[in-house]
Image: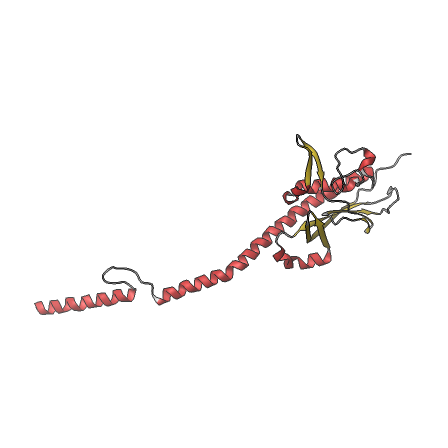
Amino acid sequence: MKGLLLSDLTIAKQSMVRARDKMGYNGTSMKYFPSRTHAHQKGASSIELALLLPILLLCFLGLVQVIVFMQSSTATQYAAFMASRSFQVYGDRALKEIAYRKVQSYPYTHTDQHIVEASAEKRIFESLSWEQRRISQLDGQDFLQRVYLDGDDISYNHSQANTSAGAVRINYLGCTQGSTCDNAQGVETTYCAPIVFPGISFLFALSTQKDPCKVQQLGLSYSGLAITKGVSLGREPITP
């Protein structure tokens, strides 16, 4: 009987050792050794992550660009309204004709710049954080004494009059250069929004082909997305 019990215990012990070995354990140190199946699964997960990361990065960069576009569009709409309001009052007159004092030399806000363009530049550059570098403060103690770097970009009914490849462009609707523009319709304001990550420019290929714009200022040269907003308020009645 005793011999049978010892034999049964030996067989049970051997079965336990074999089962433990199959599970990947060492009988002395109880250290876990990964099986081939586990290593294969880990390698497959690493490959899947490596393939997925570029797609996730592209989606993130695209989302950032969409946010930039939406903010730019909102700022341009506001600038277009203010530019059209300025045109309604002043027409295509220059800043020197109203004795505007917050001026500097070209290509900053200057005396010969159109009131309409200066109005649009101020709204856009003050609204968009990435355009803050275009702002220059004239007086270190007076925050409101500011001028804007963008040159002159003016056209009449899409006929170019002045161009400096700036980010903000003005087109007078129903008005010809040299006229009083008394019967003009309003103003189109165009902002050349930057493509933040040039590597994703192919996502906006159709937009850049339809409305191309290129900025060449501040030592930079880049193609962007043209955002054009038109507001037609006409002109105030002219009294003799």
Q: Check the image and report above or below for 97 versus 27.
A: above
The residue depicted at 58 percent of the width and 53 percent of the height is 61
Percent coordinates x, y for residue 216 in the rendering: 71, 50
Q: Residue furthest right?
A: 240
Left or right: where 197 falls relative to 94: left
Looking at the figure, which quarter contains the N terminus? bottom left
Percent coordinates x, y for residue 178 in the rendering: 88, 44
Left or right: where 184 falls relative to 103: right
Q: Residue furthest top?
A: 141
The residue depicted at 56 percent of the width and 53 percent of the height is 60
Q: Count how many numbered circles sit on residues in the image.
A: 0
Residue 55 visible within the image: yes
The residue depicted at 68 percent of the width and 38 percent of the height is 136
Q: Check the image and report above or below for 40 versus 167.
A: below
Percent coordinates x, y for residue 166 in the rendering: 73, 48
Q: Check the image and report above or below for 211 versus 85.
A: below
> What colouring method underlies this structural image?
secondary structure
154 or 240: nearer the viewer: 154
Residue 82 visible within the image: no
